[in-house]
Image (cartoon, rainbow, N blue to C red):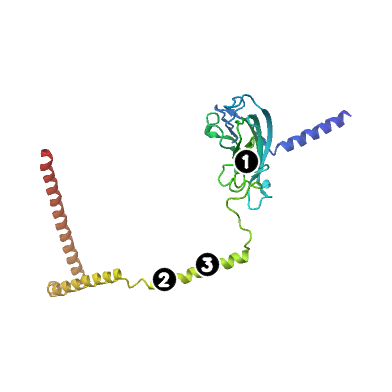
Amino acid sequence: MVKLLSVSLLVMLFSASAGAVDYLEHDGMLMNHGDGHLMDMAGGMVMGQNADTLPGGCDSISETKEITVHAGHQYAEKFPGRMFAFDTQEFNFKPCTKLTVHFVNEDKIRHQWMMHGLPKYLYPKGMFHLEISGPAKISGTLILPPGDKTYLVHCDIAQHMEKGMKAQLKVGKGDGDLPSIPGVTANVVVDDYKINLPDLITAAEAEAKALVNQPIAAPVQPAPTPAIQQEDSVISGTTVIGLAIGLLLAPYLAKKFKGMSVSEIIAYIFELLRAGIDLAVKLLSRLVKLIATSKNKILPGS
Ligand SMILES: [Cu+2]
């Protein structure tokens, strides 16, 4: 009998520990950094934790509530086109409720349960925020403000809200609905599932054809514009001047280069160029000196 008991106890212990391996429990690991900010070394984070201070307008805590919210890819399967979701999209609580949220992230990535629009004197940046790399569980507590208001709850990891991880929390009657809450309100950007793949390919091919056909006809017409004609006349004018100089210099150069090899001619041209550049540099430096001295003459007087 004792043997049977111990065996069943072992089986129970084993199955319990096997179940616990899946989710890392962060609630006992968190370190308090003050201002309701708690963190641990395993990537768990709570911000805006407030279990004691009543928001302005609350005489007392009206109710104490505890919820468990699951987050993960699997909860988005029922929402076409969404990738991530919470298991609950709408929450409702009485004003001044003390709310504890147990956030269970079932994905092997990071998710958040982030609530916005809370009073900033009590919640830094107006946020209450649970964050964890899953699979894991993390918990936090806040006291909801008085009044009827709808609060946005989402995961702020890039594109997670747009892909479905969005919910609303109504305090009292709330003050309307937020858009694009999966299964609750219509999407702001509506997905189009009417078009099928063959239609898409035909449309893409038509677009490609139109692109190929377009630029052939277009650039032909604006070619003989007056601006280009002007440019043409400028070029021909320069060519005429160049030709004239060339013709005038030709007899002189022919005399100069008579009996010289090609390499000697090239060397002579380079020497001419060097002398020209030297002259230009000398003239420039003289000009700079002139400006500098004239400036010096003006400066003491002014
Ligand atoms: Cu997320």
- Height in image: 82 above or below 98? below
Marks 3 & 2, CB-CB < 8 Å contact: no
| Amino acid type shown at disc 3 | Glu
User: In the visual, does 13 lie left or right of 253?
Assistant: right
Left or right: residue 3 versus residue 283 is: right
Give the residue type that dot 2 points to.
Ala
Q: Is residue 104 visible?
A: no
Tell me the SS state at disc 1. Answer: strand
Pointers 2 and 1 in contact (CB under 8 A)? Answer: no
For numbered disc 3, what is the local secondary structure? helix
The x, y position of residue 278, in whole percent, is: 16, 57
Q: Residue at x 55, y 68 (%)?
A: 205
Element at badge 2? helix
Q: Which residue is mark 1?
A: 168
Q: Position of residue 294 (x, y in %)?
A: 11, 46
Residue under pointer 2: 218
Marks 1, 3: nearer the viewer: 1
Disc with the residue nearer the chain's start (2 vs 1): 1
Tag 1: Cα neighbours inside 10 Å, few (<14), some, or many (≥20)?
A: many
Q: Cβ of disc 1 within 8 Å of ligand 1?
A: no
Write the residue at 16% across / 57% down: 280
Which quadrant does ligand 1 occupy?
top right
Examine the rendered structure and indicate whether residue 186 appears above or below residue 251: above
Residue under pointer 3: 207
Q: Please state, as top left, top right, bottom left or bottom right, where the N terminus lies in the image.
A: top right
Q: Label 2, label 1: how many angstroms apart (C-alpha)? A: 53 Å
Percent from the top left, x then y, of residue 76? Answer: 66, 48
Asked if 132 appears above or below 55 in the picture, the reply is: below
Position of residue 56 relative to residue 218, above or below, is above
Q: The disc labelled 1 sits on which kind of residue? A: Gln
